[in-house]
Amino acid sequence: MSFPWANQYEPKHPAMQWLDSRLPLPRLVYNAVGAGYPVPRNINYFYNFGVLAGVALVVQILTGVILAMHYSAHTLTAFDSVEHIMRDVNSGWLLRYLHMNGASFFFIVVYFHIFRGLYYGSYKAPREVVWMLGVVIFLLMMATAFMGYVLPWGQMSFWGAQVITSLFSAIPLVGEAIRTWLVGGFAPDNATLTRFFSLHFVLPFVILGVVILKIWSLHIPGSTNPTGVEVQGPQDTLPFHPYFTAKDLVGICVYLLLFAAFVFFMPNFLGHPDNYIPADPLSTPAHIVPEWYFWPFYAILRAFTVDFLWIPAKLWGVIAMFASILLLFFLPWLDNSRVKSTSYRPMYRIWFWVLVVDVLILAWMGGAPAEEPYVRISQIASAYYFAHFLIILPILSFIEKPLPLPNSIAESVFAKAGVQAESTPAPAAAQPAPAE
């Protein structure tokens, strides 16, 4: 979608004119995050989480590059090198705590970002590619975080790698070969550390590349907004700078304050104490769990305890765990409602909050021991998770009667302010295409 009313970049200084004619980098920045990018005037603070995710990614890359200068990817020295970073490297403790807690905060803002997209229908046409690229980023984040969790080579690092990589052996015929190739042997060892360290270092830059693609794809249809109504003219938008850069700065300041509180006052709150014990292949921890941000999917994995249709329970669990994420790719076609925003879908709003509670229950069960009643609760919560997307959402798309939508974004904004919207007609080129 083009925005003919957007401010156009016109360099004034001769040096900038010369640069713009040969390398239009200033123009690119101006049109992407400056006054040249019009944004719906009614977006709220829930739209800050995309920018916060970008801040978290930058923190992870910067701290990770510096930590890699002091880390030794060898089973005999990995644990000691982490302790060396904590005790002997100047500000090493700060770098490690920033990186360790930064991973958790990265997932926190991404989870909020995902549920904001679910609530406001950000996955619907014409933004399906934007949504799918977001799911790709989420998968890459999970792979990067898992490999990074193995690197300290503590007890939970080793046994987490042992449990998670063993899941691949459940795949018929090729599973054991895949696991051996991934681990570099029959059990996590030195080859595993070197491979995981290499991938953990490279994948964040892959994530950065996909983020750039996502921003590029977002700028074609433009941002969504809480009403779900598409932009129809200049009266519906404001320049990204200075209006929304100021709004994002407020969110960034709040985020950094919370982040600093964890880093300086409770840096190990989101970690596991067993990871401060060197890895011992002969001593199995009583309760093996991944990091907290994997708990919902770990609960789905453990929910399958009985063989069914000649397929082992372990394989069912692996299929369900990956399907719970891959299901998000098909969300634009599972939800056929023409209304994007849940604010105008009273029936779906109830089921959306049920889904939020269900995911929180799955997270709780994923961190609990693999015993009753936790296993049974995991099975019920997992069943609802899939039913929500495969049964409830498609049915609601047909039977739900949504509330009347405003005629324009400006109308909804001015109605809340008690002011009548100006009837400024949109330019002919800016008229939205009729919904198919």
Image (spheres, helix red, strand yellow):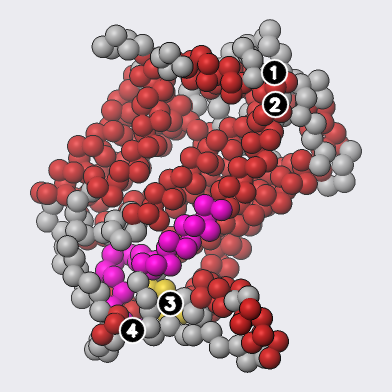
**What is the CA distance from the residue labelled 4 to the residue labelled 2?**
56 Å
**Mark found first going from the N terminus, 1 or 4:** 1
Per the image, the residue denoted by label 4 is 235
Q: Element at badge 4?
A: helix
For residue 334, above or below residue 166: below
**Mark found first going from the N terminus, 3 or 4:** 3
**Span highlighted in magenta in the image:** 209-235
The amino acid marked with disc number 2 is: Leu
The amino acid marked with disc number 4 is: Gln
Q: Is residue 26 visible?
A: no
Per the image, the residue denoted by label 3 is 38
Residue 426: x and y in percent read: 27, 85
Q: Element at badge 2?
A: helix
Q: Is residue 232 magenta?
A: yes
Residue at 28% from the left image edge and 50% from the top image edge: 332
**How many residues crowd mark 1 within 10 Å: few (<14), some (14–19), many (20+)?**
some
The amino acid marked with disc number 1 is: Asp
Say whether marks 3 and 1 touch (CB < 8 Å).
Answer: no
**What is the CA distance from the residue labelled 1 to the residue labelled 4?**
61 Å
Residue 26: x and y in percent read: 61, 77
Q: Is residue 234 visible?
A: yes
Q: Element at badge 1?
A: loop
**Mark found first going from the N terminus, 4 or 2:** 2
Q: Say which of marks 3 and 1 sits in front.
A: 1
Which quarter of the figure is the C terminus placed in? bottom left
**Mark found first going from the N terminus, 3 or 1:** 3
For residue 144, above or below residue 249: above
Q: Quadrant of residue 52?
A: bottom right
Per the image, the residue denoted by label 2 is 193
Per the image, the residue denoted by label 1 is 189
Left/right placement of residue 55 relative to residue 318 reads right
**What is the CA distance from the residue labelled 2 to the residue labelled 3?**
46 Å
